[in-house]
Every structure is written in structure tokens, then in C-alpha cells.
Amino acid sequence: MGDLMALKKLPVLDPGEISSLTASAVQELLEEGESANTVATYRSALKYWAAWFSVRYGRKLELPVAVPVVIQFLVDHLERSTPRGLVTQLPPAADQALVAGRYKGALGPLALATVTHRIAVLSKAHQTAGMPNPCATEAVRDLVAKSRRAYAKRGVVQRKQRALTKEPLQALLATCDDSLKGLRDQALLLFAWSSGGRRRSEVAAADMAHLERIGEDTYVYTLGFSKTNQSGADRAENAKPIAGRAGQALTAWLQASGIGEGRIFRQVRRGGHLGAPLADGSVRDIVKARCLAAGLEGDFSAHSLRAGFVTEAGRQQVPLADTMAMTGHRGVGSVLGYFRTEALAQAAVSKLID
């Protein structure tokens, strides 16, 4: 009874409302549940919306945003065909101001994918705030759909980053020497590629607590959280083998670095001293730097490792189910999207007449 009497001193909550403390806790849980990359891209998109709105309307952006504003954003940034050629509605002075403020990387229209992503972010902001969503109106949805069709009719396709298949990956590995940084980069590249094309966030978050050595230069890494398993469900395909050359490279890195706990991949400072764990962006930078050192031409990034693994699996006619078990894809349509032309060119289906 004494304990129950003590409870009467607690503030009484209104079951019909969310308190400010609870709202703050909910926001913290939502932010923690989102990936760092997603949060960063959302912030960048909303920052651009605010800058564009300020330039075009001369005042601060506030939600909810009116439908005419969203339509203006679309025509300002999407190209349309006219007798004068392809044009956008964004005034040159406004474009220059956005570039000068570093809200845009260069003058001119944004890519269709960038525009649609920023519409999606604004839509999400309205949904989260529980406000009427201008992006869900028929006028906006129809304009976006017709714009996609117009771009497709003009032959505009989304540019894909080059795939790091077996041969170019070997060129990257050849640039890695026996220094601590060279051993790290070799282990990182092979870990990411051989375990199914891990995303840069997954590589950066790789921890010794989830790594099990099961034989000489043979490991199993348990991937508890990923883009396709955001609830951390216990699945058989969470276990990713790190064997062969990849296992040898990982052993060499762990022995040279002395890492026994915590994050597997760390910064290497001058003098061969270990630093903090790598960030997501550092994984991308390592891939790009090694591509440059290997003299590879093209648009490569950390995602090229994932595309390369799937493409190489297609080249070598690995069963699709086995490929998906490694990559973690849950749908066939998604994994097929990673195949590149060269994989199909070597497949039997492209040579049926032969």
C-alpha cells in the first residue's frame, strides 16, 4: 500500500494527449531507428527546400507547404521541351544564389532522381507532422508521373555507378601494399565484396563482437542489422562467410592492427597508429582512392562493390537464390536491378541463336 501511495505523487498523464517529454522520446527513437545516411540526406533535402523557398518567396519556409509551392519547385528544377529547347523555370539569379550559398553543386537543372527524392522528403515531413500533405495531391502526383514519362521519352536514364567485378577489384587490391593502411584497405575491400557486397554503413559498423573464427583464415560474420533487415530479425542468411583470400586478408589486418574488440575497421594515422572507427563516408573514400590509384576510369563508389558482387555472380552463373542469400535481398526484382549489361552479355540467354 505504501508503494501505491507513493505513486500518487507522480504527475498524472492525459490519455488523450502526448506529453512534451513523451514526444521528445518518440522523436529520439525515430531518429535512432533511421540510418545515419537517411538522416543526413533528409536534412540536406530540407535545407535545400528552405534555401529555395527563401530565394523564391522571400520568407522562411514553414509547414504545411501550399500545393502551388510544390508545383513551382517542380517546374523550377525539371527540364521541359519548348521551341527554344530544354528549359526550366528557375531564374538565373536564383540559381546563382543557391550555388553561391552551396545549396547546389552547380548551375542548371537537378537530376530527376534528386527532384523526386526532395519531393518525397517534403512529403515525409508533412506526414510526420500530421499535416495535410501537398505532395499527395492529384495535381502534384500527376505532374511528377508525367515528368518521369517525359524524361523517359527523351531517353534520359538514371546513371548507375560502375560495378567492381572480379577484374577491376583485383586491380584495386594490387594497389594495397603491406603497410597497415594497405592491409586495412585490402581486408575492407574483400570483406565488403566477398560477404555479398556489403553496404558502406554495414562495413563501417562491422564489429568484432559479431565475428567468429571457425577455422584457419575462415570466419563467419553475423549481420544483425541491415537495410533489408531493419528489425534485426534472426535469419539464417544473417551469417556471412569470410573465407579464402578474404579470410586471409582479414587475418593479416587483425594481426597487424592488434584489434581484438570493437569496430573491425579503423582509421590509420601517420606513423601507423590506429585511430577512431571508420565513418560511412570513409569507406566510400577508400574505394574511390583505390580506384584512382589503380587507374580505373568511370563513376565508382562504395556501392560499386555490391553491384560488382551481383554482376560477377551472374557472370559465373551462380544460382540466384545463393546470390540473394549473400546479398540479403528479399525480392528477385531488387537483385536483378544490380545486374549489369556485361553479366547478361556472357549469359547463355544472350546467345540462344548460337
Image (spheres, grey):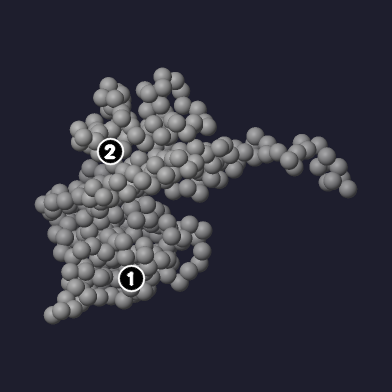
The dot on residue 323 is 1
| Of 314 and 62, the residue lying toward us | 62
Tell me where residue 99 sits by quadrant: top left
Mark 1 residue element:
helix
**Disc 2 residue type?**
Arg
Residue 3 horizontal side relative to residue 128, left or right: right
Q: Which residue is mark 2?
A: 80
Q: Residue shown at 42%/62% (left/top)?
A: 223
Name the mark nearer the viewer: 2 or 1. Answer: 2
Q: Would you say residue 15 is visible in this rendering? A: yes
Task: Please provide percent x and percent y for residue 72.
Answer: 39, 31
Mark 2 residue element:
strand
| Of 329 and 174, the residue lying toward us | 329
The residue furthest top is 58
| Of 289 and 276, the residue lying toward us | 289
Q: Is residue 277 above or below residue 332?
A: above
Q: Residue shown at 30%/28% (left/top)?
A: 90
Tell me where residue 101 sits by quadrant: top left
Q: Residues within 10 Å of mark 1 (few under 14, many from 20)?
A: many
Q: Is residue 65 above or below residue 284?
A: above
The residue furthest bottom is 354
Task: Please provide percent x and percent y for residue 301.
Answer: 25, 51
